[in-house]
């Protein structure tokens, strides 16, 4: 499979996962005025029970960052290793995950997820997320990240209207 085909397949699996697990998600999200980009960000508000949505449920929500890497050259490209969410995932093929593990270069604070054998879902291959304990790596506010997600060209709930 070509590098583009691998990226597309992995991205489709991330979209499926986010559609099932996140209230809101977006792809190709720029942060810091374009200085960084994340392949996918998912957001799940904090569940406060039966009282419904309130500001605290947004502020305490969980942001999941997903970076898709098709091969070692893509991993080493110097682009797209923005793991600054509450939960962080590297999405790749099993062979790349195994190679990163053997070389001792799995990113810290990240779960590595790969396609399952039928290639219809993503499963955890390596969990390196506890290297920071239970602390989030997120430094950005919920409102800033949500604005960045809304501003992204592709999201599951918001259509960006272009003005001439």
Image: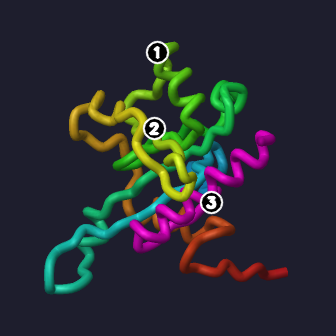
Mark 2 secondary-structure assignment? strand
Which residue was labeled with disc 2? Answer: 112
Left/right placement of residue 98 relative to residue 132 reads right
Q: Are marks 2 and 3 in contact (CB under 8 Å)?
A: no
Please identify the quadrant where the C terminus is shown: bottom right
Q: Quadrant of residue 29?
A: bottom right
Contact, mark 1 vs mark 3 (Cβ under 8 Å): no
Could you give the CA–CA distance between mark 1 and mark 3, rounded to whole angstroms? 28 Å
Q: Earlier in the sequence, mark 1 or mark 3?
A: 3
Q: Position of residue 22 (x, y in %)?
A: 41, 68
Number of labels in the image equals 3
Callout 2 crowding tier (Cα within 10 Å): few <14, some 14–19, many ≥20:
many
Q: What residue is at 22 percent from the left and 33 percent from the top?
A: 133
Residue under label 1: 104
Tag 3 secondary structure = helix
Q: Magenta segment: does it hold 5?
A: yes
Q: Which mark is residue 12?
A: 3
- Assign a secondary structure to mark 1: loop
Magenta-highlighted residues: 1-28
């Amino acid at each position: 499979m070509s590098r583009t085909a691998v990226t597309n397949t992995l991205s489709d699996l991330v979209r499926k996962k986010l559609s099932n697990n996140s209230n809101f998600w977006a792809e190709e999200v720029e942060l810091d005025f374009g200085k960084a980009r994340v392949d996918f960000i998912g957001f799940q508000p904090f569940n406060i029970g039966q009282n419904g949505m309130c500001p605290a449920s947004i502020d305490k929500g969980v942001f999941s960052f997903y970076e898709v890497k098709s091969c070692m050259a893509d991993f080493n490209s110097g682009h797209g290793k923005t793991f600054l969410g509450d939960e962080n995932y590297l999405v790749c093929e099993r062979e790349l995950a195994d190679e990163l593990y053997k070389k001792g270069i799995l990113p810290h604070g990240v779960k590595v997820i790969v396609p399952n054998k039928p290639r219809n879902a993503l499963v955890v291959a390596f969990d390196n997320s506890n290297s920071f304990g239970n602390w989030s790596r997120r430094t950005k506010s919920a409102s800033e990240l949500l604005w960045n997600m809304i501003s992204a060209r592709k999201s599951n709930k918001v259509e960006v209207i272009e003005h001439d």
